[in-house]
Amino acid sequence: MVSSSEHGNFNLVIRDMGIDDIAAVFHLGEELFTSELYPYLYRTWDEWEVIGMYNTDSEYCMVAEVDDRLAGFILGTIINKVSWTYGYITWLGISPQFQRRGVGDRLVDKLIERMVEDGVRFMLVDTDPENTPAINFFTRKGFGNARRHVFLSMNLGKHEFYGRLISYERDKADRYRHRPRRP
Ligand SMILES: CC(C)(COP(=O)(O)OP(=O)(O)OC[C@H]1O[C@@H](n2cnc3c(N)ncnc32)[C@H](O)[C@@H]1OP(=O)(O)O)[C@@H](O)C(=O)NCCC(=O)NCCS
């Protein structure tokens, strides 16, 4: 599927993500989901995230292009429950030079259109509570009922018990590596 439109003074194309887009999408995400700005998004973004979603939900993975350059991407999925079919926007990223020009808007519209065709009647999205641009963006798109979700984390290496478990596993691996080989 390809949809093209004149947007302000640039020609915006929204199309399905293809296998050749995977690397570019991953690198744009790396640029956007930085550890200083959004630690949780940063920790969960990697190439397997893009490859995995392309593998399981390719119909909900789309890119935006301006003059053959990647301007943004959206990766979504569907969650089927007895009462509702939910559409979930897992990742959305717009290249800094194309932000605030309606690219995110078009990507979300296209994804929702496709999801509605597939039975979705309820949309979900989440982001870091400090991510004001995204919260404003989604609020403007009509999302509401914001609930604060608390993410907790633990560095296992610094934990009294798990830290010892990690050392034990490391020593075990070392012993195995240095085991004399049978002739
Ligand atoms: C959030 C994001 C997807 C918005 O995409 P976009 O293409 O710039 O958004 P649009 O141009 O379609 O919509 C713009 C509207 O969104 C809101 N918005 C977008 N960026 C904003 C910012 N930096 N500050 C405040 N509001 C912002 C405003 O309501 C804005 O309307 P306005 O320009 O009339 O004030 C984009 O900024 C982005 O990629 N951010 C980094 C990645 C990210 O946080 N992704 C979401 C979580 S996975």
Image (tube, rainbow, N blue to C red):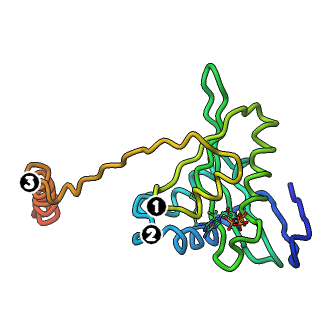
Residue 5: mark: none
Disc 1 within 8 angstroms of ligand 1 (CB): no
Q: Which sits in the foreground, 27 or 179?
A: 27
Residue 130: mark: 1
Q: Position of residue 55 (x, y in %)?
A: 63, 50
> Which quadrant holds the N terminus?
bottom right
Residue highlighted by disc 2: 37
Question: Which type of secondary structure does the marked residue at label 3 adopt?
Answer: helix
Q: Which sits in the foreground, 50 or 80?
A: 80
Three-letter residue code for mark 2: Leu
Residue highlighted by disc 3: 164
Which comes sooner in the sequence, label 3 or label 2? Answer: 2
Q: Residue extending furthest top? A: 82
Q: Residues within 10 Å of mark 1 (few under 14, many from 20)?
A: few
Q: CA distance from mark 3 to mark 2?
A: 32 Å
Q: Nearer the viewer, mark 3 or mark 2?
A: 2
Query: Are discs 1 and 2 less than 8 Å apart at CB?
Result: yes
Q: Residues within 10 Å of mark 3 (few under 14, many from 20)?
A: some
Question: Which type of secondary structure does the marked residue at label 1 adopt?
Answer: loop
Q: CA distance from mark 1 to mark 3?
A: 35 Å
Q: Residue at x 72, y 72 (%)?
A: 71
Three-letter residue code for mark 1: Glu
Count of marks, rendered view: 3
Three-letter residue code for mark 3: Arg
Q: Which sits in the foreground, 92 or 59?
A: 92
Q: Would you say 103 lies left or right of 123 here?
A: right
Question: Which type of secondary structure does the marked residue at label 2 adopt?
Answer: loop
Q: Would you say 100 lies left or right of 180 here?
A: right
Q: Residues within 10 Å of mark 2 (few under 14, many from 20)?
A: few
Q: Residue at x 57, y 39 (%)?
A: 145
Q: Quadrant of ligand 1?
A: bottom right
